[in-house]
Amino acid sequence: MTNSKVARAIIEVSDSIAEHLAGMGPEVQGAILAELFSRWLAGHMLPDEPGAVEVEKMRDEIVGKWLKLVFEMTPANEAMIRETHGLPPSTMPPKGGMN
């Protein structure tokens, strides 16, 4: 699959999930996303060493990288949401969050 096809698939699935989450409130949305994230993270394992320290170290690294990606993506998504709702652009710096 080409990068552009992967990007389109990501947006398509993300939009579908967003439609399911719409109107549920932040607590429920957060719990659903946490459930999905924990399922994804649980799939990162070392089958020969369940519960090993190496698994936890690997998951810690994955979470750190994932959160960095989330914070990098957030300003663009906030800008789209603000525009959709007719709000002025954010005054937050374009790069924030995790370093």
Image (tube, helix red, strand yellow):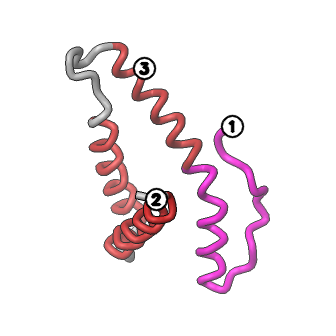
Mark 3 vs 2, N-terminal side:
2
Compared across the picture, whether 98 is left or right of 2 comes to right
Compared across the picture, whether 21 is left or right of 75 comes to left
Packing grade of label 2 (10 A; few <14, some 14-19, many >=20) is: few
Residue of label 3: 57
Magenta stretch: includes residue 83: yes
Foreground residue, 31 or 18? 18
**Residue type at tag 1:** Asn
**Residue 88: x %, y % from top left:** 74, 78
Residue 99 shows which numbered tag?
A: 1
For the point 60% across and 56% down, the residue is 73
**Residue 14: x %, y % from top left:** 41, 66
Up the image or down, 16 lies above or below 31; here it is: below
- Which region of the structure is painted magenta? 70-99
**Residue 74: x %, y % from top left:** 60, 58
**Residue type at tag 3:** Lys
Magenta stretch: includes residue 22: no
Mark 3 vs 1, N-terminal side:
3
Check contact, mark 3 vs mark 2: CB within 8 A.
no
Up the image or down, 47 lies above or below 22; here it is: above
Packing grade of label 3 (10 A; few <14, some 14-19, many >=20) is: few
For the point 63% across and 51% down, the residue is 72
Q: CA distance from mark 3 to mark 1?
A: 19 Å
Residue 2 shows which numbered tag?
A: 2
For the point 45% across and 27% down, the residue is 60
**The residue tagged with tag 2: helix, strand or loop?**
loop
Up the image or down, 31 lies above or below 50; here it is: below
**Residue 46: x %, y % from top left:** 27, 22
**The residue tagged with tag 3: helix, strand or loop?**
helix
